[in-house]
Image: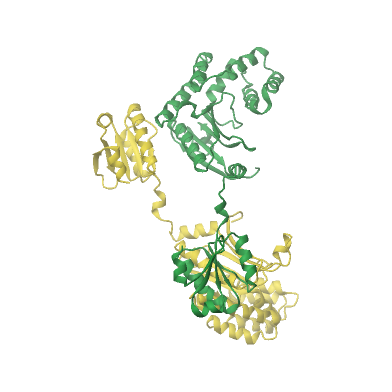
Chain colours: A green, B yellow
Amino acid sequence: YREFYQCDADVIGTDSLLCEAEIVLMIREVCKGLGIQDFSIKVNHRGILSGLAAIADAKGNETSLFVAIDKLDKIGDEKVKEELRTKGFSDKSIDRIFDILHFQGSNLNKLEMLNSKLEDTETGLKGVEDMKQIIELLSKFDLDAETIDFDIALARGLSYYTGTIFEVKINKVAIGSVSGGGRYDDLTGVFGLPGVSGVGFSFGVDRLYDAMEELKLFPEETDESTEVLIAHLDHETMLYGLKALKQLRREGVAAEIYPDTVKLKKQLDYANKKKIPFVIVIGSDEMKSGQLTFKNMKTGEQQQLSIEEILIQF
Amino acid sequence: YREFYQCDADVIGTDSLLCEAEIVLMIREVCKGLGIQDFSIKVNHRGILSGLAAIADAKGNETSLFVAIDKLDKIGDEKVKEELRTKGFSDKSIDRIFDILHFQGSNLNKLEMLNSKLEDTETGLKGVEDMKQIIELLSKFDLDAETIDFDIALARGLSYYTGTIFEVKINKVAIGSVSGGGRYDDLTGVFGLPGVSGVGFSFGVDRLYDAMEELKLFPEETDESTEVLIAHLDHETMLYGLKALKQLRREGVAAEIYPDTVKLKKQLDYANKKKIPFVIVIGSDEMKSGQLTFKNMKTGEQQQLSIEEILIQF
């Protein structure tokens, strides 16, 4: 994934938390629309992370803290603790952090806990407050508090996020994370529009594709492109077949004609290989009578039909 | 256009000229589908170009000849002649070439003329023969010989073409050429599949887009994305509005709610600017009675309706 496609949605110009709620709705809609059932929408807030940093006496060393705890999922407690010690965090600070990270409970329980733990940090309380409001807004869409997976360890690499942070994980696939995003209060300044809050997220299209392949979510019918193949026996019958081809296409039927004059068996093999469900065979008798051989490749059944009678089948 | 998107179609594994005819059909379909009326499908054949090279005694110098005459459109007769002289072509050779390039007549007349001029070159006659067959095949699709713009000077830069060559020009726009292609007998060898003939073409998507912009072919309605904006006056009415939002979306109506609590005028201005055709206004009266204000932004007309009555409008 060194070069990749992203599918983005952003709202800029407002700091309304409704946008965060809408992003959660959008992620759900996209995943469900693609047939993905088992996914988690991980959410956290930079304010809460700042609160944690304050508790851990991490002043000037915040990034090391965030980078370390973001790996908790992958490398586990001991390695994260080791990393924090190397970066100069005291055992006491590390214990305080892990007390919070290990807290078990519902999202609302977690928020209550954070409310008391972070009571001395303004940004921490702001993060808790935002999170509560997002949950309240989601409830208006009949989504309960557990719709999101509020993960206090989620930090994400990108340092420009200033508020809510999102990450979408598809469970039980190798790739896992397929989408991320968050609120950025200063990012638009880089593009000459300072002082405007925005929030957005993007799906990694290639990652999503690979995950869907792994989950076998692409329907078999996407293989089937041509509905009818016109087979023929010589140059004359091929030219005659072009007329049928034209009529089928005019009616919106995806039709193709075998481009070379070869044995009928080869043409039928081609249809089978390409999963083309119907074949029209044109020989000299068919050309004379106008009654074409219409063959159902699944059942093997075949009938003599005029092109008009064939058109009705589609 | 240093990095760009292409939209390709290729057939490999057959040398049937039906594929060339299908490409002409496809190009017409695409252009017409996009609303492009005035375009030319330029066609030539490498065999005919080889025949020209033989007539011009260009042995070992063919590429110079092709490169020069391909520019005829852009730089005109005199400059092409000058270039050919510099490259060592005799005046006699140049005259022979220009006699052919200047020939006036229908496509079938041109082919007759070439048939006699190129009678000593095998590849030249093959080119003429292929071109005639393509025209015959097109006639089976009710397209006359002039459907294609048979251009003896068309050479295209890519040296891997071995048969028919295509170029699509959109007339009366700055960009002009938006598509090209041709038959390649040896190209697949590069990818480990030697001895397989193929033919294909590609539209330059960015070029096509720019040409369509210039011709103003993108409909104005593509600007209109949201059908209804829900406007509100305070936090309470916004929360109430979320219910309406949910119902509208469930019915497939593209709806959004203004994310901040601001003056109604600002919300209506936003709707106008974004060309949103309808606005639902929710104040405390509307919340009590359930009769929402439904405003048509084009006519200015407004009615008091229940959400169910509003849903019927879409």
In the rendered image, residue B93, in percent from the top left (x then y), is placed at 68, 82
Closer to us: A110 or A229: A229
The quadrant where residue B155 appears:
bottom right
Task: Give the residue at the far top of this rendering.
Answer: A92
Quarter holding the N terminus of chain A is top right
Note whether residue B285 is visible.
Answer: yes
Whether B116 is drawn above or below A157: the answer is below
In the rendered image, residue A106, in percent from the top left (x then y), is placed at 51, 21
Note whether residue B38 is visible.
Answer: no
Closer to us: A17 or A135: A135
Task: Give the residue at the far bottom of this rendering.
Answer: B116
Closer to us: B181 or B55: B181
Whether A235 is drawn above or below A41: the answer is below
Say whether residue B259 is left or right of residue A226: left
Closer to us: B225 or A53: B225
The quadrant where residue B7 appears:
bottom right
Q: How many marks?
A: 0
Whether B216 is drawn above or below A174: the answer is below
In the rendered image, residue A34, in percent from the top left (x then y), is placed at 52, 43
Residue at image x 62%, y 27%? A70
Residue at image x 44%, y 25%? A133
The quadrant where residue B219 appears:
bottom left
In the rendered image, residue B29, in percent from the top left (x then y), is placed at 49, 65
